[in-house]
Image (cartoon, rainbow, N blue to C red):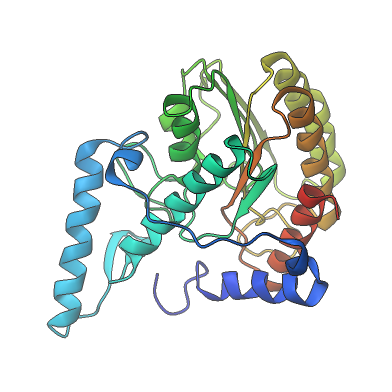
Amino acid sequence: MGRGHPECPERLDAIEDRLIASGVADALDRREAPLASTSQLELAHSRMHVASIRGLAQEVIEDDDAGGTGHLHIDPDTSMNRHSYNASLRAAGAVVAATDAVINGEMENAFCAVRPPGHHACRARSMGFCIFNNVAVAALHALQRHGLQRVAVVDFDVHHGNGTEDILAGDDRVLMCSIFQHPFYPYSGTEAPAANMVNVPVPAFTRGAAIREIVEQAWLPRLEAFRPEMIFISAGFDAHREDDLGQLGMVEDDYKWITWQLKEVAKRHAKGRIVSSLEGGYNLSALGRSVEAHLRALADL
């Protein structure tokens, strides 16, 4: 995204370092992600949008080769360099490959340590650090390519997953549950959401205890009634109290507790099948610790 941008390569380094230092890395089956195909991206995005991003990728490479800045801005927050297109293909490809592996029984669940994130990417628009919507692509892949009938998407990022809602709203095969700080970027999620959206906006400085209560009262009853055959998690960790991009008050134990609740739902209805994909999280120390807590719960460590 450019020098000084919070969505930086060091995010994945911080996760890697924490998993190695904590010993969690030793318990993981680690796989390199493939690139998503055009047909997979077009499950969630318009053909014109996918072609447009491909064209922008070529444009930024030509600009870089000609001695230009090497960056092209999609919006004020989101830019591409010559490597961004392949990175975005690999991010979406990771979540699709994880979905295949979990549905095929190769693993019970998976976490995708990917960037750029995805949940702000709409059907026909990239925004908010996001180019393609990784979780929406994978959820629709599970439905349309594997024949599942019901999947849930859970988003606990500090920002509303407006792109995921844009793509999945009104699709009765999907239930999306989210919490997000409001009013806050992208200033959405509160205007007459579709019936398959469980959007719970919370004010700044809401702490973990209140969010756990929301999960128990708003999310879990809907998830139980829906009986998802697979759960996808948009795992943003910028609601952590140390993360300056938001003003919520979650801590590592809150992420672990939410993950446990989702695992119990998945055990009852989805054969334990969960695929989680990294979204936000910009305080590097808090991000590493939070992902560790999330993975300890996923892996029963």
Residue 163 drawn at (x, y percent): 44, 39
Please state which of residues 247 and 73 is positioned toward the viewer in this rendering.
73
Q: Quadrant of residue 18?
A: bottom right
User: Quick check: 264 above or below 60?
Assistant: above
* 274 vs 26, nearest the viewer: 26
x and y, in percent, of residue 105 in the image: 64, 38
Of the pair 91 and 194, the residue shown nearer to us: 91
Q: Residue furthest bottom?
A: 67
Q: Is residue 66 left or right of residue 239?
A: left
Rendered view: 230 above or below 243? above
* Number of numbered discs visible in the structure rendering: 0
Q: Is residue 128 above or below residue 218?
A: below
The quarter of the image holding the N terminus is bottom left
Q: Looking at the rendering, in which quadrant would you find the C terminus?
A: bottom right
Left or right: 93 with respect to 180? Answer: left
Q: Residue at x 73, y 70 (%)?
A: 19
| Apparent side of residue 256 relative to residue 38 in the rendered image (left or right) | right
- x%, y% of residue 283? 66, 69
Point out residue 242 in the picture as x, y percentages from the top left corner: 74, 65
Q: Nearer the viewer, residue 179 or 204?
A: 179
- The answer to whether residue 141 is seen in the rendering is yes
Which residue is drawn at the image coordinates 66% and 43% (left, top)? 156
**Residue 160 figure quarter:** top right
Q: Residue at x 78, y 51 (%)?
A: 299
47 sits to left or right of 168: left
Q: Is residue 185 visible?
A: no
On screen, 126 above or below 162?
below
